[in-house]
Image: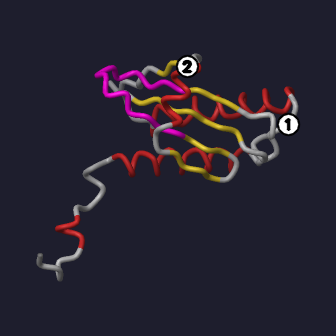
Amino acid sequence: MDKTPTIERIRKRPEFLAAAQAPSVARGAVVVQRRDRADGDPVIRAGFTATKRVGGSVVRNRARRRLREAARLLLPQTGRPGSDYVFIARGGTTTRPWARLLDDVKSALLRLAADQDPASAPSAATSDPSRTG
């Protein structure tokens, strides 16, 4: 039977800082950072943050709640086991239509997965067959 990966929360500052050094993708109302932990643990971890530039505490909390729900729906299918994801709310996170926010998160997750997949990136030797050398 299909086994969905376990998803846990990132809560400690050093874990957020480690993910900040990893590749990130900005799509619409969200920025997603992905760090491969390379520790052999298949658990997917996710953290959520919103700066004061997003708005007051009520707005920031709503933005994080929306990102948590989007991650809950999308990470089991598009997340990579053994990775840490940090979702950063941007200005329009709370006002963006739900379907568009889901599209933003999904496209960011797919882009990060494609960037990290060595099989999807063609090597320099095979990218241009006319070059010999």
Quarter that holds the N terminus:
top left
State the SS at label 1.
loop
Task: Characterize the local packing of mark 1: few (<14), some (14-19) or many (20 or more) Cα atoms within 10 angstroms.
Answer: some
State the SS at label 2.
strand
Which label was assigned to residue 55?
A: 1
Q: Which mark is nearer the camera, 2 or 1?
A: 1
Q: At x 17% / y 80%, what residue is drawn?
A: 131
Q: Nearer the viewer, residue 104 or 26?
A: 26
Dot 2 amino acid type? Arg
Q: Is residue 61 magenta?
A: no
Residue 33 at what x, y percent from top left? 52, 39
Residue 75 at what x, y percent from top left? 50, 34
- Residue on which disc 2 sits: 9
Task: Characterize the local packing of mark 2: few (<14), some (14-19) or many (20 or more) Cα atoms within 10 angstroms.
Answer: some
Q: Is residue 37 magenta?
A: yes
Magenta extent: 33-46
Question: Is residue 132 found left or right of 13 in the rendered image?
Answer: left
- Using the rendered view, name the quadrant where residue 70 is placed: top right
Question: Is residue 95 found left or right of 88 in the rendered image?
Answer: right
Q: Nearer the viewer, residue 13 or 49?
A: 13
Label 2 with label 1: CB-CB less than 8 Å: no
Position of residue 24 relative to residue 128, above or below, is: above
Residue 52 at what x, y percent from top left? 80, 34
- Using the rendered view, name the quadrant where residue 35 is placed: top left
Q: At x 22% / y 61%, what residue is drawn?
A: 123
